[in-house]
């Protein structure tokens, strides 16, 4: 391990501890008694959440007869915590983390797959232009997530030794992006719109899941909640599909103000992202081959774990 790597891991852990703050975009007062009829949905400022943002902001959920509050987090593990702790009943996640939650005892109901994507972006000052150049480099990702699985894809595709790619856990996507801009990290996996922002700053893209036959995004509900609200969830999904149809017909740029506010990006990012994301998929169950792919990844990962790690991940 390079001399400064230990310090960097410690530094990023401190940064990560400052992230993950919840931004309840509908201005729900968390100090007031919670409305038992209000559905809390855990989201992140990422492009795969745009149908939910649109459905909430344009009244599609309200028209469908469901009261929804979108609670926005900066780290996927905070979405998981919200689902596990019961402060959210629905959440946007990926299949890797969803299966992790299920292995830890939380039964999930899958509402839809999403077109979530990730890009492996290298720092433009690091002179990393090919996957093979990631040898002996640091890659920011989130443990036990889609980006962890994609780190294995990186290692296998470039035929690198796993121990030669230093996976640095940086959960907060804003912190991760800041580390790229500051030149602290060699490479990282970024979702949209962060990947678009990185490209606009001339950071090279080494791997793009949009070019792979792999769909890892998902919207899930906890099973007890799904059993209790089956008919209402159909209305929720109908409103979601209405938002998907609107985005597909008009494009992301038609909702420039919403996208900029909800994702925290400028007009240049909105326009560029609108050219690269031309469609969203309507509500559909995750493909069995993607579920199986992730399940096989988990079996291999668990087989390589220590006894203590296996006790943590059942």
Image: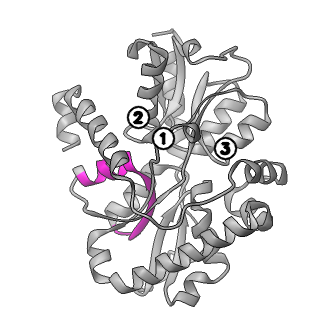
In the structure shown, which secondary structural element does the residue marked by tag 3 occupy? Answer: helix
At a point 40% along the width and 85% down the height, the residue shown is 232
- Which comes sooner in the sequence, label 1 or label 2? 2
Would you place residue 206 above or below residue 240 in this image?
Answer: above
Residue 175 lies in quadrant:
top right
Q: Which mark is residue 213?
A: 1
CA separation, marks 3 and 1?
21 Å
Front position in the image: 51 or 261: 51
Would you place residue 91 above or below residue 237 in this image?
Answer: above
Label 2: which residue? 149
Q: Which mark is residue 189?
A: none
Q: Is residue 34 among the parts visible in the rendering?
A: no
For this view, does 177 lie left or right of residue 124? left
Front position in the image: 138 or 34: 138
Residue 279 lies in quadrant:
bottom right
| Magenta span | 86-102
Label 3: which residue? 194
At a point 45% along the width and 10% down the height, the residue shown is 1
For this view, does 298 lie left or right of residue 71? left
């Amino acid at each position: 391990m390079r001399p400064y790597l230990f310090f960097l891991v410690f530094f990023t852990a401190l940064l990560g501890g400052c992230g993950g703050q919840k931004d309840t975009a509908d201005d729900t007062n968390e100090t007031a008694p919670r409305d038992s009829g209000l559905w809390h949905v855990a989201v992140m400022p990422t492009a795969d959440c745009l149908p939910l943002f649109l459905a909430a902001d344009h009244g599609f959920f309200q028209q469908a007869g469901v009261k929804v509050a979108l609670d926005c987090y900066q780290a996927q593990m905070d979405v998981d915590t919200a689902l596990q702790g019961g402060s959210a009943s629905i959440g946007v996640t990926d299949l890797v983390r969803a299966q992790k939650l299920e292995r830890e005892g939380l039964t999930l109901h899958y509402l839809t797959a999403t077109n979530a994507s990730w890009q492996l972006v290298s720092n433009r000052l690091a002179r990393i232009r090919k996957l093979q150049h990631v040898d002996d480099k640091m890659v920011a990702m989130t443990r036990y997530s889609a980006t962890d699985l994609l780190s294995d894809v990186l290692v296998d595709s470039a035929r690198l030794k796993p121990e030669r790619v230093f996976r640095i856990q940086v959960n907060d996507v804003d912190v991760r992006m800041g580390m790229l801009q500051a030149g602290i990290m060699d490479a990282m996996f970024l979702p949209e719109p962060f990947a678009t922002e990185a490209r606009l700053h001339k950071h090279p893209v080494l791997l793009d899941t949009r070019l792979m036959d792999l769909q890892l995004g998902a919207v899930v509900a906890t099973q007890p909640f799904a059993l209790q609200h089956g008919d209402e969830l159909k209305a929720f999904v109908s409103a979601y599909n209405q938002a998907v149809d609107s985005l597909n017909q008009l494009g992301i740029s038609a909702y420039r103000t919403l996208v900029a506010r909800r994702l925290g990006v400028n007009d240049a990012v909105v326009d560029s992202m609108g050219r690269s994301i031309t469609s969203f998929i309507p509500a559909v169950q995750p493909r069995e081959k993607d579920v199986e792919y992730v399940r096989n990844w988990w079996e291999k990962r668990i087989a390589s774990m220590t006894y203590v790690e296996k006790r943590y991940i059942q």
